[in-house]
Amino acid sequence: MERRIFWQSTVNNSSSTELCLLLTRQITTLSVETDVSMRNLLLLVMLLLVGCSPSEKKDGHATTQLQTFLDGFLGSSPRGRRQPDDSLSKESFDRSLAKTQAQLVQLRAIDTSQLKGDDLIDWKFAQSILVGREVEQAKIQAWKRDPRLFMTFTGISDVINQPIDVSKKIAQVKKRLAIAPTQLENGMKLLDTYVPRFQELGLFMAENGYALFDKEIPAFAQLAGADGDTILHLSKAARLSLERYIHFIKDELPKKEKGDFAIGYDTYNQMLKGQYLISYSSDSLYEYGWKMFNQTVSELEQLAKEIDPSKTWQQLALEIKSDGPAPEKMIEAHQEWVDKAGEHIRSHDLISIPWNERVRVVPRAEYLRKTSYYGNFSSAKSKDQDSIYTSEWMINPYEEQWDAKRKQEYLTEHDWGVIIVTAPHETYGGHHVQGLYQLHHSRKLRRTNGISFFSEGWGLYNEQLMQETGFFPNERIHLRQLQLRLWRNARVIYDVGMHTGKLTYEDAIQLMTDKVGFLRWAAQLEVDSSTASPGYFIGYFTGMMEILKMREQFKLKRGTQFTLKDFHDRLLKIGNMPPSLMSEALFNDLK
């Protein structure tokens, strides 16, 4: 009783939210030997004792309490990702889970009835982020199954290639090299489930890591001056650890209990409801995926009749895919259509782009080339040495050492159609433009956090937007655009299907090869990404459809004042959140 009186007296003279934050930090940093469930129980009891219960209204404005919470919350890693200098030990994973659950208790202690407008939306967004982290940390636990998670040393290549002064890179490189042996050793301790495809991909990634230690780091060390010897010493130790890790993946991991990559029906539904804030269940989303897949097939069939009634859409798609740039000009070809996409956005006044910016197309790092069949995009995070916001579209380049079959397969998947359609998705006005708006958002929560349902939905929306506004040079490219949309329809089907038991891995590959038209190797790389990132790929098509719904509603509200530019600018200025929150913010502004 005396302890309760003391705490209540303390609350009367302190900020309740600040006290909650202090207690949470103390409890979640208890000795790692303390059971996680016991730490969480202690946390909940203490929060109730000091008056942090969600059912009690404390003095002080809820907006101030929210901001205090967000100030602490934003100190954690963006989007819940592991920091590159994290040890990736069992204890660190336990602490991360305890911290996430504690933050949920703190956030839910804020009286949301006192919040409105953007503050209420931020509260909902923060909760969705934390719920997603809790699902990942408590339910999915990829650290037990995927050896790639422990190879954060691969990020050193990105650091070395950053467009900043060498002196600013040295500390990052040294820190990542120093922790790499510990991370790899912890991987060998914690990986207790053998997932064959994860093992294969992990081995590929690990063996390609030798190029980093044998080529990139020695070359960087020569530029590092007095720090060069230290970098080489750290690199040697990390490389030896990598050798042991490769042996483990090859010979020891297959002896572990065999498991699957699927996260399960209940976990998938928790993710949909709590993280993505959508009304679909996994069952209804699976049905919706098939419905829209079949609708896209119907559009393809109709367009094929208009182009050439004697051929099916699949036959026309194969013809279109046989026409592409010269292999040695692949980078230049992509750059050409990136620049054309930017000019189209500006000349048609579709989106405001008020920054000094550009996009460069560059070859993808070698160790990443098996993580997807095509490439990836890196949005500008700051101005480069030329004071320009420069994003990079990194594609898998054509390689002369391939055999004839591999060369032909590559060229088939890098045709003019895919280049012309994908350039707007990745660059103008897709990820590059959306990334710039997010980078300049005034609210830090929205500046540093995002979700595939909007960002990838926005990218796919831009493919559709370019078709609507006349960017594609002919109907054959339009057909290719529809085929690429069919691919995103398929993503909804196989992501839900594989992770909830409706489809096997081979079922997903067959869907991509037989019904979408991918070559097997490309389909396999595509599906592999979904096995490692459950829920991410459903955001492309589902997100695009939500944006189109918002556009129609916005058009009705604005009437004769409606313009595409007004809609796009308003939407991008809101942030990068679940579509339901984007819609809420968009129409709040119109009231």
Image (tube, grey):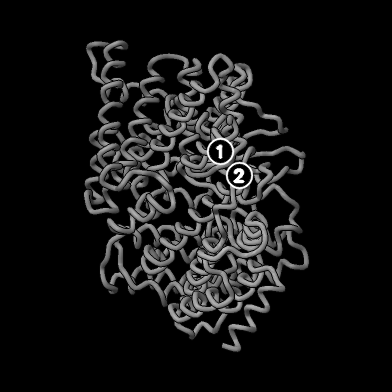
Q: Mark 2 points at which residue?
A: 118
**Residue 430 visible in the shown view:** yes
**369 displayed left or right of 64:** left
Q: In this view, does 339 lie above or below 308?
A: below
Q: Residue 305 has which mark?
A: none
Q: Residue 585 has which mark?
A: 1
Quarter containing the N terminus = bottom right
Nearest the eye: 104 or 209: 104
**19 displayed left or right of 311:** right
Give the amino acid at mark 1: Ala
Mark 2 element type: helix
Residue 117 on image: x %, y %: 59, 43
Mark 1 element type: helix
Q: In this view, does 288 lie above or below 172?
A: above
Give the amino acid at mark 2: Asp
Quarter containing the C terminus = top right
- The answer to which of marks 1 and 2 sits earlier in the sequence is 2
Identity of the residue drawn at 64% across and 69% down: 16
